[in-house]
Image (cartoon, grey):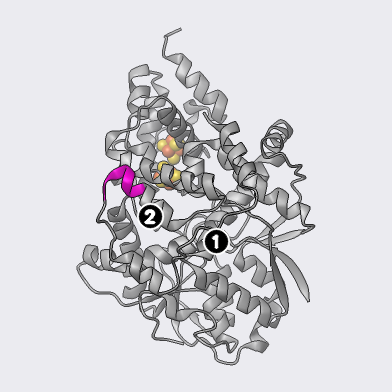
Amino acid sequence: MIANQKSILELQQHTGVNVNRCYQCGKCSAGCQLADEMDFPPSMVMHMLQTRDEELFQQLLNSKTIWLCVSCQNCIERCPMSIDIPQIMDYLREKSAGEHKINHQSRDIVAFHRAFLDSIKYTGRLYEIGLIAGYKTRTFHLTQDVKLAPKMYAKGKLPLVPEMIKGTRNIKGIFSKTKI
Amino acid sequence: MKKLGFYPGCSLKGSSSEYAQSVLAVAKAFDIELEEINDWNCCGATAAHNMNKELALSLSTRILALAEKQGFEEVVVPCAACYNRLTVTQHELNKDEALKQRVSDIIEMPISGNLQILNVMQLIDKYVADRLEQKVTTPFGHKVACYYGCLLVRPHNILKFDRLEDPQSMDILMKRSGAEPIEWGFKTECCGAGFSVSRTDVVAKLSGNIVKDAADRGAEAIIVACPMCQSNLDMRRPQINEYLKQKINISVIYITQAIGLAVGLSPKEVGLQKHFVPVKIG
Ligand code: SF4
Ligand code: SF4
């Protein structure tokens, strides 16, 4: 067995998706609205997995594709074989983050996710000002959207104080128990 | 008075407060009481399920468990993204007992998995639609583009809500409110979802294509049922117009705002003044 089979076997076990069932018709890529921003469109992802080549697998973990996929589920709905590509993307993202292989051009996207999760971890809910502050300190995009926040506030769309839930200990417990 | 559980989700408490306001106002106009789930938390949205599947499942399950504990059989979830997360989570738990047990241990609460989770259109279909036409006092006499987005209809095998490529539920409700829904091609295309901040350029492009098609086909408003769709199409209009290199003024209003106006609620009562692109119809 080639050494690289292992990654694909693990992927198939975790997602329940058999990558061999894809016959490369390309419908997923044709319907994916993010495909032209991606380095590998979804059908290409399937093809790369089918080769069972470890190097290509590593390229996927390091790709822009996995972070650009918005899980809109269009590909699976249109796929003649109902292949669950969004599930594969979820798996690859979690693995990429866990193994510190995040594509450096996708760091803003991941920084946003992390800032979002931090906000939930401490208050139980999303605190939008905290989210933006967290995102800005992570990315140094300090001046982005500076005009938007005051407008939102004026329209009553931006509470200044976070809503703390009572069960924040429970939420922290959930975070610590699920940490990868 | 009919009483149902209510999961507003974070955006309805902040950037999309007018959605919550209009949902509650319409419910009240039809004698439905929506009671918030006690101590609810964020469902984790895109961030949790992109980064950690177990975390995403646990955050959503805590909400479901709290709703069960409060004795609700039905819970209304107006945000399409939350609706999707909660429904998919319940489905995953119900098909895998071991997973259900593990998640229940993580959240330290029991979960039966028997809740009825309703999106806003399902709420209206079930409890309002019959009485809607007779209650309309000011028909919503405008051409509208009903925009469903992705998360309300997909994945179909789990949500089992409406047709995939050309859904109808919102169009039917708008017709009953006196509007004229247009035929167009972007009903379920993606608006750019959670990329509003981290990839504003992607949102400008995807949302721009949606806004442009609706306007080109003569719609006077885009009707939505998701805070993420609304804020991408509305709050990001400066970036959209820059991408399109033309100024499009079409407003983006929630289905509950449109229905509210049709049954005689004031623009203020449904929070129309909170939109960024001014709403000139009503
Ligand atoms: S639509 Fe399905 S079968 Fe066709 S290329 Fe994509 S994954 Fe493969
Ligand atoms: S789920 Fe991801 S890969 Fe599939 S169509 Fe949507 S964005 Fe593209």
Query: Residue B192: which numbered mark, if any?
Result: 2
Question: Badge 1 is on which residue?
Answer: B79
User: Of the residues under marks 2 and 1, which one precedes in the sequence?
Assistant: 1
**Residue A149 percent location from the top left of the image:** 35, 65
The quadrant in which residue A45 appears is top left
Q: Position of A13 compared to B250: left or right?
A: right
Q: Position of A144 compared to B159: left or right?
A: left
Residue B189: tell me if it is visible.
Answer: no
| 2 and 1 marks in contact (CB < 8 Å) | no
Q: Which contiguous range is marked in magenta?
A: A135-141
Give the amino acid at mark 1: Cys
Q: Residue furthest left?
A: B245
Q: Are labels 2 and 1 on one chain?
A: yes
Residue under the point 31% across and 68% down: B237
Helix, strand, or loop for circle 1?
loop
Q: Residue furthest top?
A: A1
**Residue B130 percent location from the top left of the image:** 70, 79
Q: Position of A73 compared to B126: left or right?
A: left
Q: CA distance from mark 2 to mark 1?
A: 16 Å
